[in-house]
Amino acid sequence: MNCLVIHGPNLNMLGKRNPEIYGSFSLDDLYEAIADHFPEVDFTFFQSNHEGELIEIIQHATDGSYDALLINPGAYTHTSIAIRDALEILSIPKAEVHLSDITQREPFRKVDVISDVVDQRFMGKKIDSYIEAVAFLLNKVVVY
Ligand code: DQA
């Protein structure tokens, strides 16, 4: 399985950013943990703080290069109809992931404009949210 992993704004600051909420590991540590856990998966990792760049990488994924998409859109989860619309166009299996449980935080984080265009959400378990999401995507890609 070729899996595109996309991270949105401020997730490049993992390790330095609210470690009590997001954990003390860096984004590179997170990439390594996922890749080590699934040696059979070919991962492409992408992070951007820019909405347009995130939309463009999602659009490029419609060319058939990837079997599945995992995305943590960061704060764009709560605001970006444009990222939502780009995801809607992409027909491969898609998982939305959050390190924290956005349903148990500030009211503005409970708004999720992405959830209706992904297959499933995984959240609240830090790195384990990602492990669960990749396992879900692997199962979907193998079955279909
Ligand atoms: C996050 C949750 C978002 O509300 C926040 O803006 C982030 C990270 C998470 O992984 O828990 O940047 O997506």
Image: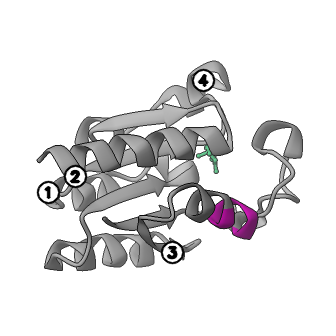
SS under mark 1: loop
The response on whether ligand 1 sits within 8 Å of label 2 is no
Q: Are marks 3 and 4 in contact (CB under 8 Å)?
A: no
Q: Which residue is mark 2?
A: 141
Numbered badge on residue 46: 3
Q: Main secondary structure of the magenta part?
A: helix
136 displayed left or right of 129: left
Q: Nearer the viewer, mark 1 or mark 2?
A: 2
| Three-letter amino acid code at the position of disc 3 | Phe
From the viewer's perspective, is the residue at label 2 or at label 4 nearer?
Answer: 2
* Residue linked to disc 4: 107
Q: Residue at x 49, y 38 (%)?
A: 132
**Which element type, helix, strand or loop, lies under badge 4?**
helix
Q: Amino acid at mark 2?
A: Val
**Span shown in magenta:** 28-32
Q: Along the polypeptide, which appears first: circle 4 or circle 1?
A: 1
For marks 3 and 4, give the one nearer the viewer: 3
Mark 1–mark 2 contact, CB under 8 Å? no
Looking at the rendered structure, the kind of residue marked 4 is Pro
The residues bearing labels 2 and 4 have C-alpha atoms spaced at a distance of 34 Å
Q: CA distance from mark 3 to mark 2?
A: 21 Å
Above or below, 39 against 59 in this view is above
Tell whether 44 sits left or right of 98.
left
**What's the mark number on residue 91?**
1
* Label 3 packing within 10 angstroms: few (<14), some (14-19), many (20+): some
